[in-house]
Amino acid sequence: MRQARLLLVEDNQTLCEVLTRNLRARGYQLMVAHDVAGALEALRVRDFDLILLDINLPDQTGWDLLRAVKNSPDIHLCLTADGRLPVVVLSAVRVTIARLEEFRPFAYLSKPFPLEALLRLAAQATTLSSSRANSYWSSS
C-alpha cells in the first residue's frame, strides 16, 4: 500500500516544522509550499491525496489558490465520494459559511488547533482517498 501524499501550504515556518515532523512520523509523504505560487507548481507536477491549506498566505489567499485550481485545465483534484475537495482549510481568521459552501473542503480547522485534530482529519481524508469517486473538481 502506498503512502498518502499530502501538500502542506503554510507560510508560518514554526507550524510547518511541527506539522512536517508529525505527519512524516506517521508515514505520510509530504511536500511543503509557503505560498500560492509554490502550491500551484507542486499541484502541476504531482497528485496529492490531501491539501492542508492556510488561507492567509504572503502572495494570495488560499481561496485564490482553490479558484486557480478550479480554472486550471492541467490540475485535477479528485473529489471525495461525497463530493468534497480533498482539502483541510487552516485559518487564523474566521471562515464564512459561504466560503465553505463555495469550495466544499473536507474540513476546516481554526488556528490554533489541537495537533491531534489535524492528524485525525488527515487519517480520515486519506482513508477516503482510496475510495474516491472518479470525479474531478472542475469549473464545469
Image (tube, grey):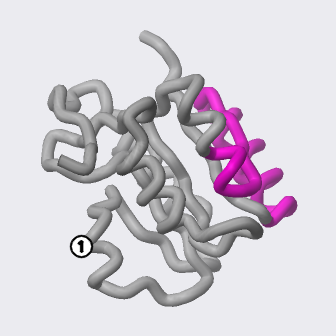
Q: Quadrant of the N terminus?
A: top left
Looking at the picture, does residue 133 appear above or below residue 17? Answer: above
Q: Which residue is mark 1?
A: 101
Identify which residue is drawn at 25% across, 50% down. 139
Q: Residues within 10 Å of mark 1 (few under 14, many from 20)?
A: few
Q: Is residue 11 magenta?
A: no
**Helix, strand, or loop for circle 1?**
helix
Taking 135 as reference, is 75 left or right? right
Task: Report the amino acid beneath label 1.
Answer: Glu
Quadrant of residue 13 within the rendered picture: bottom right
Identify which residue is drawn at 29% across, 84% down. 97
> Which region shows up in magenta?
12-39
Taking 38 as reference, is 102 left or right? left
Residue 107, position as x, y percentages in the image: 37, 63
Report the predominant secondary structure element of the magenta stretch: helix
Residue 76, position as x, y percentages in the image: 37, 34
Taking 93 as reference, is 83 left or right? left
Residue 10, position as x, y percentages in the image: 70, 59
Looking at the picture, does residue 38 appear above or below residue 111? Answer: above
Quadrant of residue 105 within the rendered picture: bottom left
Residue 30, position as x, y percentages in the image: 65, 34
Quadrant of residue 126 within the rendered picture: top left
Q: Is residue 35 magenta?
A: yes
